[in-house]
Image (cartoon, rainbow, N blue to C red):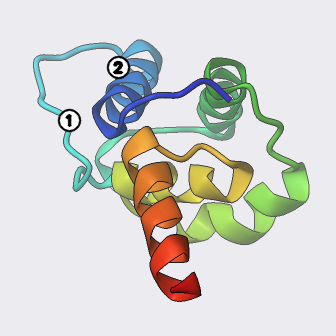
């Protein structure tokens, strides 16, 4: 996984969503609800494939079946990517500091 900042990860997810839904002038945020988009199952598959390609991860169908219905916002998508190691360099640094403090 490339070292990306929190902002870069978020922007890449927004870019994937914009490309998939088409830009209509709306502004995406991490709080944007997925129900605002009219996504069919093909859209969901294409978004998943774009996320896999962009972040160099493999998201199993079983994970999508279990977690997919629980994803309500774009922020939820971002959080779910952590399960596959898509963690910002800021979070990596925080985790290292946390581990050092726990060892002290």
Q: Residue furthest front?
A: 104
Q: Quadrant of the N terminus?
A: top right
State the image quarter where residue 23 is shown: top left
- Residue 13 in the image: state x and y as whole percent: 43, 31
Return the x and y of residue 88 as percentages of the image width and height.
45, 42
Picture residue at 73% right of the left edge, 25% below the top: 56
- C-alpha distance separating marks 2 and 1: 8 Å
Q: Is residue 26 left or right of residue 58?
A: left
- Image height of 44 relative to 52, above or below: below
* SS label for mark 1: loop
Q: Residue 28 carries which label?
A: 1
The structure residue drawn at horizontal position 52% and vertical position 72%, both measured from the top left corner, is 100
Relative placement, left or right, of 29 versus 40 is: left
Kindly check if marks 2 and 1 are in contact, taking CB atoms under 8 A apart as contact. Answer: yes
Q: Where is residue 20 in the image (x, y as percent from the top left)?
A: 47, 19
Residue 17, compared with residue 77, is above or below; it is above
Residue 63, picture quadrant: bottom right
- Label 1 packing within 10 angstroms: few (<14), some (14-19), many (20+): some
Residue 30: x percent and y percent? 26, 49
């Amino acid at each position: 996984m490339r070292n990306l900042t929190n902002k870069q990860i978020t922007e890449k997810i927004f870019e994937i969503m914009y490309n998939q839904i088409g830009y209509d002038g709306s502004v995406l945020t991490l709080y944007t609800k997925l129900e605002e988009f009219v996504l069919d199952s093909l859209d969901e598959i294409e978004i998943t494939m774009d996320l896999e390609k962009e972040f160099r991860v493999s998201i199993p169908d079983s994970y999508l079946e279990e977690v997919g219905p629980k994803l309500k916002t774009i922020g939820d998508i971002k959080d779910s990517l952590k399960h596959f190691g898509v963690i910002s360099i800021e979070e990596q640094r925080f985790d290292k500091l946390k581990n050092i403090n726990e060892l002290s």
